[in-house]
Amino acid sequence: MGVVVRNLQSVVPLRRARLRADVETLRLIFGVQRFDMSIVCVDNRRIQRINHVYRRQKQPTDVLSFPFYEDLRPGKLPCALHRDDYNLGDIFLGVEYIMQQCKGTSQDLHEALTVVTAHGICHLLGYRHETEEEWNEMQQKESYILSEFNRRTGSRLEPLTKRCT
């Protein structure tokens, strides 16, 4: 299966092929190319609803991750014993929200989607940012992944800098 990119929104024009290619590069760098994951692109209304149901937050957001392995220690790959276990989980991208953020910073939408997806993959792999220590650990991982992505692709992506809980 690999990566499935679904676009369930029509607010923002999206090039799924480019996002899928960037996600394949990220999977290689993370060392999880054997694992399946899905990327679901949604609008503000849908991401807000998901955010409310799962996090009790009544606003849209950039990314929500739903790991298949909920108790994974950061940096450890899952021990997959059966074909069905080769699933990292699902990442929902709030494409409309991300586009609005890009307008404020003049950042390219597809670059922002790649950065936010890297953040989401970190969550699928057990990284959290509820404490200062967790945030620093996750920030280090994202910085490494994106610098390696930049080296391979000639991009200039920067990790997310906001400290969210």
Image (tube, rainbow, N blue to C red):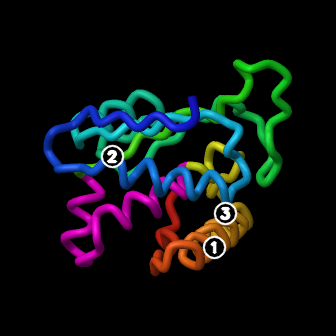
Q: Nearer the viewer, residue 82 or 107?
A: 82
Residue for badge 2: 16
Give the CA separation, mark 2 to mark 3: 26 Å
Q: Which quadrant of the structure image shows residue 50?
A: top left
Residue 138: image tag: 3
Which of label 2 and label 3 is nearer to you?
2
Q: Which quadrant of the structure image shows residue 34?
A: top right
Residue type marked 1: Glu
| In this rendering, position of residue 33 left or right of residue 91 | right
Residue type marked 3: Met
Residue for badge 1: 148
* Stretch of the chain drawn in magenta: 97-120
Residue 33: image tag: none
Res. 79 visible in picture: yes
Instruction: Point out the tag, 2 or 3, that comes first from the N-terminus.
Output: 2
Query: For the point 50% across and 60% down, which residue is it?
Result: 164
Query: For the point 71% across and 32% down, which residue is it?
Result: 69
Q: Which quadrant of the structure image shows residue 51?
A: top left
| In this rendering, position of residue 135 left or right of residue 53 | right
Instruction: Point out the tag, 2 or 1, that comes first from the N-terminus.
Output: 2
Q: Main secondary structure of the magenta part?
A: helix
Query: For the point 67% across and 63% down, which residue is it?
Result: 138
Give the CA separation, mark 2 to mark 1: 22 Å
Which of label 3 and label 1 is nearer to you?
1
Within 10 angstroms of label 2, few (less than 14), some, or many (20 or more) residues?
A: some
Give the CA separation, mark 3 to mark 1: 15 Å
Instruction: Point out the tag, 3 or 1, that comes first from the N-terminus.
Output: 3
Q: Could you say whether the residue bearing mark 1 is in a helix, strand or loop?
A: helix
Q: Could you say whether the residue bearing mark 3 is in a helix, strand or loop?
A: helix
